[in-house]
Image (tube, rainbow, N blue to C red):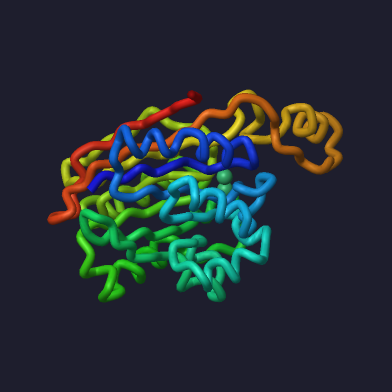
Amino acid sequence: MRLLFIGDVFGRPGRTIVRRLLPQLKQELQPAVVVANTENATHGTGMTRSAFEELRAAGVDIFTGGNHTLGKPEILELMQEYSQVLCPGNVSPVIRRHGSVIWQTPDGPLAVINAMGQYCMNGVDNPFRYVEEVLHDPQIEAVCARIVDFHAEATAEKAAMLSFLDGRVSAVLGTHTHVPTADARVTALGTAFITDVGMTGVRSSIIGLDPEVVMRRFQTGIMYAPRVAEGDATLMAVVVDIDASTGSSTSIALLQRDR
Ligand SMILES: [Fe+2]
Ligand SMILES: [Fe+2]
């Protein structure tokens, strides 16, 4: 089972490059399933219905979230309508059941679990206990291929999540920092890992935002309204190959494309 996992899609430039490149990437790589973190899909905060429709039409199957997902409350309606729209389940009891999904791919079922780290994040339940609880759900327990989008700030917290889940899930994929890391690997126990997949958005930006506004904020301390950066975008993703019969991953590769 080949998984294409796209890092945080940021604003219109991020959505546009997904729309432009995903069809050809699907032809080329033949993934069984496409997952994208879309916490920043609409103006950098959350995802509206129109952004969801746009990305779904482009070929995204499952939508994971993060600390910005609840920034647009209409996500609650989307999550109720579409089981493939997720939000980290340890953020709030209200959305706990939207933290995971079992998706039927041509190569068998895939369970996707979305959790958020506690470092630098407010009001988040313990992600280790949350993931443990989800893994004991009898339906998820029965699925071999299981991945976790761990949306977290700290590299150590992400590494700890890998240690916690090593050999128990197919992949632990970090999101949120928007900076891809050079540590993609498959452990001896068959879990694919990367600290951060990176961002799908404008590269010459400050993690997706217009540098001018962010610099003004840093220099003056005044919280000017952020603005999505304009310019050429890059799509950042990982390709993970999973043995669907055992749940072990055989490879993970970082992918960056701008054309
Ligand atoms: Fe993000
Ligand atoms: Fe985030």
Task: Report the front residue among 79 and 162.
Answer: 79
Relative side of 213 to 138, left or right: right
Does residue 143 lie above or below 215 as drawn? below
Q: Quadrant of residue 76?
A: bottom right
Residue 138 place in picture, x, y as percent: 26, 76
The total of numbered circles placed on residues is 0
- Is 164 on the left-hand or right-hand side of 125? left
Q: Which of the four quarters of the rendered structure image does ligand 1 lie in?
A: top right
Residue 27 percent coordinates (x, y): 33, 36
Q: Look at 73% across and 28% down and name the residue there.
A: 211
- Report the side of 114 relative to 102 (left or right): right
Q: Position of residue 221 (x, y in %)?
A: 83, 37
* Residue at the spot 84% in from the left edge and 40% down from the top edge: 224
Q: In this rendering, is residue 133 above or below 164?
A: below
Pick whichever, 184 or 17, lies toward us. Answer: 17
Q: Position of residue 37 (x, y in %)?
A: 49, 49
In the figure, residue 109 lies in which quadrant?
bottom left
